[in-house]
Each structure stands twice: as C-alpha cells, then as structure tokens.
Image (spheres, helix red, strand yellow):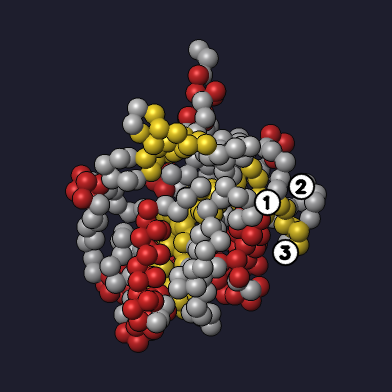
Amino acid sequence: MKDENIKQETELRNNLLSGDWVIIAPTRSRLPENNTNCPFCNLKNQETPILIYNNGKIVTDARKWTTIVLPNKYPIFVPLVNECSSRDEDCYKIKSSGHHELIVTADHDKNINELPIKKIKEIFDCYQSRIIALKKDKFVKYVFIFQNCGKKAGASQAHPHSQIITIPFIDKELKLIISNAKKHFEENGKCLHCEIIEKEIQINKRIIAENKTFIAYIPFAPRFIYQIIITPKRHSNLFEDISDEEKLDLAEIFKKILQKYDKKLDKPDYNFYLHNSPSDNKNYDYFHWYFSLTPRLTYLAGFEIGANMEIITKYPEDQAKILK
C-alpha cells in the first residue's frame, strides 16, 4: 500500500486551550527501527555532509571523520522558500521553513562518557559552528540542540548522535524561563542563574562536579529525579561565545557527569538539551545558558501529565550524595 504520509508536510498547530504548540510531522512515521545495518557507520546512503571534523580539524573528505554533521533524512522541518501561517476551522497553524541536522560521532559503540576529552570537544565545536550558521536564517528564532541516548530516551538509532532542530518561535517553556530571568534582573540588577550558582557553591549540598569554568548541580526543585544542570560559572547568555578552553572544560565535566550516571544509576538511558538565547536579534544579556541532563528512570503518570507537576521520590540533596 502506498504511504500517503510521504506527501504530507510538517505543520505546527496551536492548542487554543493551553497555548501549547504541537508538531505534526508525518515524515517521522517513516523513521526506520533500530537495526544491525547502522546508517552512520556507512554514509553512502546519507545526504551530503554539512560539516566534517577529523581529529580536531575541519576537513572536506567524508571518508575520514571523527565527528560529522548531516542533514536528517527524516526531518521534522525542511527549508522552504516562504513561511506561511493560516487559520483552519478556527485553529491556528503554521507551515514553516526549518532545519533538522544530526551531529554524529564516528565510534558506533562509544557514548560521550567513553570518548576522549578532545573528541567530546568536537561535538561542542559542531554545536557552536551550526548555531552561528543557522541563526542567520530569517525564519529561525531558536536553535534547539539535544541528544537522546537509549530507547527509553527516544533514540531510534543506537549509534550516538545529537540533533539540531530550528524553530520559528520561542517555545513556551523557554519563554517562561527567559521571562523569569528578565523579571529578576529588572528587580535586582543581577542575573538569576549567577545568583543560583553562588548559592549552590555556598551551600555545597547539590553540586555534583565543578572545574575552573563550569559547575554541575542538581537543582533545588528538579524537574526529574537526578536531573543535572551544567552551566558556565562566568555570566554568558550565548553558547556560541564559548572559547576553545571552555569547550575542553565543558567536555571534561560532561564526561564526568555521564560516568557518574553509568556507575551510580546502572547505565541509564538519558536525554540532554541546551537552553540558549533565542536567535531573534533581541538583547538577552540577562539570560544565562545551560545544559540540562536527565536519566530516564521513571515514567510520567496521569498526575504528572495532567497537572504538569512532577513527583520526585528523593530529596535533591540525597540525590547529590548518591551521585557524589
């Protein structure tokens, strides 16, 4: 039977009751299941690479690579000539130009925590380079970077890879976080996240790891159990402003945190994502970028989904003791 979904385009639809947006992406139904024929170990069936690294250097030969950026073969968004929005049966929807890319590391059997620091840095090199390039697109208002590791975390392929999806607006959660940061700055003249970092260092009950430039801690009120925030100690609202030295420090602390997950939580599946300033040419000096990492140890039930309020079964301070 012919798959009619192939002809259908991605739409963003707005829930009028909640104001939330959902993505209707029929092309994702064609996503192949994880199998022994890894699409990333042999790139012949992939699209033309966007960026290729070989041991710390940008190269053009796709036959020799250690980290590579590829267009997603089953994208949520694709570049369009025109952005359009419309009302259909009193509902708001958008068909929008966008990008969906994959950042793939060469070793099929090694997750981030098993890579050398310099190879982890290459991942952040790719993040930085692609944010700078993609934010120039007039349809891009936010560059969302994330990784799913394991089936419970939503990974469709076992081969480690991150993803970049551009969005034509700022998502509801980030908009609220930015709004709170702005309000705090206007009322106190200080960055909210900088104050949180100072307090975490002073109390020292939830810090999991730190080095010269980064700190990793479990939030006072985590969204999920064993959620960890990794953020720069210096104030910075743009991830793309990160230096080479800072990327090495970030790689070191990422590796350390994921090793702790493996050792203390029995190698859980996990997700991480970057919260960065939007790309809409506004001033977000009051914002402070960070990564959020979450092991997938529990499932959301009716209360968590309906009330949008998670139940955490251990105090964050006790979680920190276990991971430390």
Q: Quadrant of residue 244?
A: bottom right
Residue 208 is situated, as x and y percent measured from the top left of the image, at: 40, 74
Q: Residue furthest top?
A: 1
Earlier along the polypeptide chain: callout 3 or callout 1?
3
Per the model, the C-alpha gap separating discs 1 and 2 is 8 Å
The residue located at (76%, 59%) in the rendering is: 58
Residue 76 is situated, as x and y percent measured from the top left of the image, at: 52, 39
Q: Is residue 309 visible?
A: yes
In the image, 159: left or right of 188?
right
Q: Which mark is residue 68?
A: 1
Count the numbered circles shown. 3
* Type of the residue with mark 3: Gly
Which residue corresponds to mark 2? 62
The residue located at (60%, 55%) in the rendering is: 135
In the image, 165: left or right of 220?
right
Residue 147 is situated, as x and y percent measured from the top left of the image, at: 50, 53
Q: CB under 8 Å between callouts 2 and 3?
A: no
